[in-house]
Amino acid sequence: MRRMSQESGSRRRPERRVSSQIQREVMQLILDRRLQAGAPLPTETELMEDLGVSRNSVREALKALQALDIVDIRHGYGTYVGEASLTPLVDGLTFRTLARPDGDTAALAEILQIREILEDGLVRRVAGTVTDDELDALAAVVDRMEAAGKAGEPVAELDRDFHELLYASLGNALVPQLLGAFWTVFLRVAGARGWTDDPTPELTVRRHRDIVAALRARDVEGAQRAMSDHFRGIEARAAQASRGVG
């Protein structure tokens, strides 16, 4: 039985390699033909001919690429180039974090640490690019955050709006996507663990005002310190929440 299992396994390994190779070839085809998101892919029959593989191999490869949001299979309509979003990353990180025991804060701390490293570096760049109008818009978000906190309403989405707006002046489309991915993971984990409210909205508001004030003064070091203080507060709340402390 063991020998049969080994022989069966050895027969399957080449199939897995072929499948991954076909996936790469489909991606290369998309690149070579300069197909943009939403553009139709060749039909299964055309892909079979172009790649020299079976229909089942093509379907297996396309399903794997769909999981990565590289292709979009619309049953009854065809297959299209996907958005290649960060959704697979978000799903994987969320599962990885929630797979830890409830009392284990390490996985969530890792997510926060990566986000902090990104934002500490980005806020230094923002200090040289952000305009007065953009600073006024950031201050307005903080005002709404303060009003929501006083009314006992959640401020999480306003907090997210602040950080997305903060880096708009960089003109880097990947920045809001990447930060949004880590933010979504954090909120999903917080919700699953029962932590849905900010116990200290006043402190959260003050730390965001400190960031805006430092940027208005074109104080790069001050902006970075304010951002680091903000993350110290998030990390402390996360640790408390994971232990069931509100």
Image (spheres, rainbow, N blue to C red):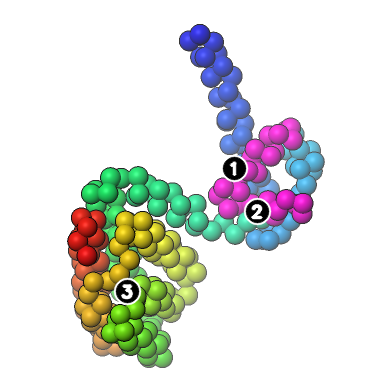
Hey, which quadrant is residue 184 in on the image? bottom left
> 3 or 150: which is nearer to us?
150
State the SS at label 2.
Answer: strand
If the image is split into quadrants, where does the C terminus sit?
Answer: bottom left
Q: Residue at x 69, y 39 (%)?
A: 59
Q: Which residue is mark 2?
A: 72
Answer with left or right where residue 70 lies relative to residue 75. left
Answer with left or right where residue 91 lies relative to residue 155. right
Hey, which quadrant is residue 117 in on the image? bottom left
Ranked by sequence position, the earlier of labels 1 and 2 is 1
* Residue 35 visible at all: yes
**Mark 1: few, some, or many residues within 10 Å (few <14, many ≥20)?**
some
Answer with left or right where residue 80 lies relative to residue 138. right
Q: Residue at x 26, y 81 (%)?
A: 205
Q: Position of residue 170 (x, y in %)?
A: 43, 75
Q: Which residue is mark 3?
A: 123
**Rendered image: mark on residue 202:** none
Write down the region rendered in magenta.
53-80
Q: Which residue is mark 1?
A: 64
Amino acid under label 1? Ala
Q: CA distance from mark 1 to mark 2?
A: 11 Å
Q: Residue at x 44, y 55 (%)?
A: 90
Please check the rendered image and state whether residue 75 is part of the magenta-colored stretch, yes or no: yes
Amino acid under label 2? Asp
Q: Position of residue 64 (x, y in %)?
A: 59, 42
Answer with left or right where residue 229 lies relative to residue 195. left
State the SS at label 3.
Answer: helix
* Residue 211 visible at all: no
